[in-house]
């Protein structure tokens, strides 16, 4: 089993790490405090190709491996998860569906401006009464005289209201299936479409330098040709989109956990009590050991899920496992980092206080820990508990 990264993977990890530590990390506290979207950082990341990863080259993307993308995302998130979620939502949620199911005409019009990172694209799934339960989607799209007429609302939609947002892909009810369940379809809505309105930006506990808005649709009309993929395939599309998104949120969580560890380790080396560095006390040393161990495990789980996806193999269970474990690892790391800092960690301007505020959303976005545990459990019950060992054997023989 070969754990060495390829030259491509090392390149994107190192490029992201250098930019994140040199440019993003020194500004993270100010951006969080001012709740300001970092347009200049996003533009520079676009120039570096970081907002184009995994996307088709024909439209200006960088079709790198999913592993390389997640390595880069971890490094960006290690510096600031607000920038990390902007990157993740743009690539995994916004652009990936356009790349997977868009027609050549749709891709030329909507994906091409976004694949370079010069414009952003959003994905509209969550609603006041739907999210985990996508079947509860209440937004409707009625096909009338060659146009989709959309009515409803979405909430918490990332990258939906920036000055460079080009549009959103909306999940809507387009009818009913023979069994009575809703027929869901994905529909492309450009940003300047009449009847489409963004509500005020949210006041958030974390991700304060990222962009999230509620979306409102009132007789919003787009051409029939704006249907993304086949009619009625929206449920399948969003499941596939969220599988990849869960791996990416796992990478974001690993980055945040690593940032917590970085601060905790530095504090343990420099803070002195009773004549020696606090890291020399077993109580603190064990905290650091546990943090490092869990982060290494979480990173390995994320990269295995990404590796499986790169090879076209099933990875839904591994995506949920990685997302659950990495997000909960980050939460524990943030808590321990504050504990190691003591009173300083309780001060709002400290990095670990910011991390502690930011970390909770990782257990909620892209599927809560509860729904991901249900996915894992259902997979085990339906397929048997032998699959993880069998998959690991295949990795060993093919690596």
Image: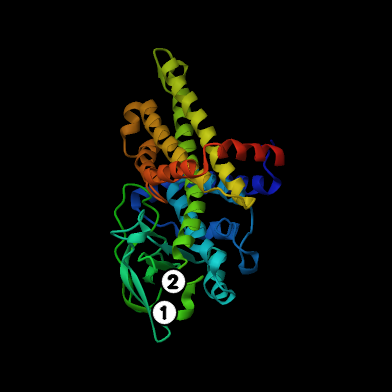
**Nearer-N-terminus badge (1/2):** 2
Picture coordinates of residue 301, whole percent (x, y): 54, 39
In contact (CB < 8 Å): disc 1 and disc 2: yes
285 or 327, nearer to the observer: 327
Residue 145 in sight here: yes
Q: Which residue is mark 1?
A: 222
Determine the secondary structure under disc 1.
strand
- At x 43%, y 63%, the residue is 123
- At x 50%, y 41%, the residue is 322
Question: In the displayed image of the protein, which residue is found farthest to the bottom?
Answer: 145
Spatial CA span between label 1 and label 2: 9 Å
- Side of 390 where 220 appears, left or right: left
184 or 190, nearer to the observer: 184
Picture coordinates of residue 186, whole percent (x, y): 44, 68
- At x 32%, y 39%, the residue is 348
Q: Which mark is residue 187?
A: 2
Task: Say if 248 sits above or below 235 in the image.
Answer: above
Number of residue marks: 2
- At x 47%, y 56%, the residue is 239
């Amino acid at each position: 089993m070969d754990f060495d990264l390829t030259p491509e993977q090392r390149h994107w990890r190192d490029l992201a790490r250098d930019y994140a530590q040199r440019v993003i990390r020194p500004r993270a506290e100010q951006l969080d405090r001012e709740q300001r979207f970092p347009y200049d950082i996003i533009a520079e990341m676009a120039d570096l190709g970081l907002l184009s990863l995994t996307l088709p080259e024909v439209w200006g993307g960088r079709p790198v491996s999913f592993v390389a993308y997640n390595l880069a995302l971890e490094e960006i998130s290690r510096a600031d998860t607000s920038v990390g979620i902007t990157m993740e939502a743009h690539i995994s949620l916004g652009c990936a569906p356009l790349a997977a199911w868009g027609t050549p005409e749709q891709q030329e019009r909507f994906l091409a401006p976004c694949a370079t990172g010069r414009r952003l694209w959003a994905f509209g799934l969550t609603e006041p009464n739907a999210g985990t339960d996508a079947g509860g989607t209440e937004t409707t799209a009625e096909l009338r005289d060659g146009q989709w007429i959309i009515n409803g609302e979405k909430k918490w939609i990332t990258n939906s209201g920036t000055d460079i947002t080009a549009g959103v892909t909306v999940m809507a009810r387009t009818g009913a299936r023979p069994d009575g369940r809703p027929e869901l379809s994905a529909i492309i809505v450009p940003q300047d479409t009449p009847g489409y309105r963004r509500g005020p930006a949210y006041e958030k506990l974390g991700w304060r330098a990222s962009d999230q808005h509620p979306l409102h649709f009132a007789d919003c009309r787009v051409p029939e040709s704006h249907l993304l993929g086949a009619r009625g395939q929206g449920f399948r599309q969003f499941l596939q989109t969220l599988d990849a998104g869960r791996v990416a949120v796992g990478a974001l969580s690993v980055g945040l956990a690593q940032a917590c560890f970085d601060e905790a380790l530095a504090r343990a080396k420099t803070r002195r009590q009773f004549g020696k560095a606090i890291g020399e006390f077993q109580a603190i040393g064990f905290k650091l050991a546990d943090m490092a161990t869990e982060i290494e495990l979480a990173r390995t789980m994320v990269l295995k899920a990404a590796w499986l996806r790169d090879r076209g193999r099933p990875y839904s269970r591994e995506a949920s496992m990685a997302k659950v474990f990495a997000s909960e690892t980050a939460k524990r790391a943030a808590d321990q980092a504050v504990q190691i800092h003591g009173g300083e960690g309780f001060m709002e301007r400290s990095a670990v206080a910011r991390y502690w505020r930011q970390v909770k959303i990782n257990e909620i976005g892209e599927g809560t820990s509860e729904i991901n545990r249900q996915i894992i459990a259902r997979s085990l019950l339906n397929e048997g508990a032998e699959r993880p060992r069998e998959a690991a054997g295949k990795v060993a023989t093919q690596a």
